[in-house]
Amino acid sequence: MIMARFLLIITAITIYSCNTSDISISSKSLIPLLENRKWEYKYEKSDSSLIVEITKIVKEPGKITAVFNSFPYFGDFGVSVSEKTDGSFVLNEQDFMFIPPTENINTGYKWESAEWKGTIVNDNENVYVSNKTFKDCIHIRYSLSITFSAEMWVKKGEGIVKWSFIRTNPPSPEFGYFLLNE
């Protein structure tokens, strides 16, 4: 009887491990969701900079969630991002899928989520940032009605290397990009 319980417990642990091990938390992910991971961005039109940091990681079946100190890529609407097993990334506070499933990351792919419209502009673009060239970046453009637009370049294993968020109606007084500062 003890042996049967032991085997049942081992089987349950194995099944749970298999169901959660497909969540990528390594540098292989588009945006590496690792606790204490930091990105510093410099605004190209001034000396201002901004630090984005993961403060907590929560692993659940089917997804991994990162809590950020801020998430300014879409106007700082919330601080919790989940990566799902299909490779998609969701800004939880808006239930907004800002990166589609891996199988859909192809130039020209379009999707809608939480009133945002997204387009993969290029799935293999080189971006020069902070005296470094990031090869094979994914360039994504977004719009929310006629009011907001955003775009970002994502490098697998690095995360977001270049981005902008602007108000288009009424227009932002100055347009510029935030660049990863390594």
Image (spheres, helix red, strand yellow):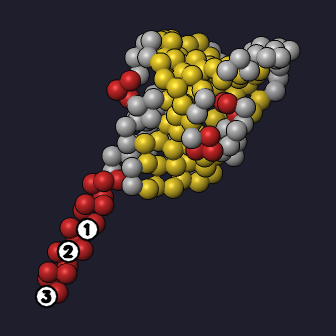
Tag on residue 1? 3
- Distance between the alpha carbons at the discs numbered 3 and 1: 17 Å
Q: In the rendered structure, which disc, 3 or 1, sits on the residue that comes first in sequence?
A: 3
Disc 1 crowd rating (10 Å Cα; few below 14, some 14-19, many 20+) is few
Can I make out residue 169 in this image? yes
* Residue 54 drawn above or below residue 102: below
| Mark 3, secondary structure of its residue | loop
Q: Is 104 situated left or right of 150 in this image?
A: left
Q: Are marks 1 and 2 in contact (CB under 8 Å)?
A: yes
Three-letter amino acid code at disc 3?
Met
* Residue 151 drawn above or below residue 33: above
- Distance between the alpha carbons at the discs numbered 3 and 2: 11 Å
- Distance between the alpha carbons at the discs numbered 1 and 2: 6 Å
Three-letter amino acid code at disc 2?
Leu
- Whole-percent x, y for residue 163 in the image: 65, 22
Tag on residue 137? none
Residue to which mark 1 is pinned: 12
Q: Work out whether residue 165 or residue 50 is closer to the camera in this orientation and state it.
A: 165
| Mark 2, secondary structure of its residue | helix
Three-letter amino acid code at disc 1?
Ala
Residue in view at x 41 percent, y 22 percent = 105
Q: Is 14 situated left or right of 36 in this image?
A: left
Work out which quarter of the rendered image holds the C terminus and state it: top right
Residue to which mark 2 is pinned: 8
Residue in view at x 52 percent, y 49 percent = 65
Disc 3 crowd rating (10 Å Cα; few below 14, some 14-19, many 20+) is few
Q: Work out whether residue 134 or residue 154 is closer to the camera in this orientation and state it.
A: 154
Q: In the rendered structure, which disc, 3 or 2, sits on the residue that comes first in sequence?
A: 3
| Mark 1, secondary structure of its residue | helix
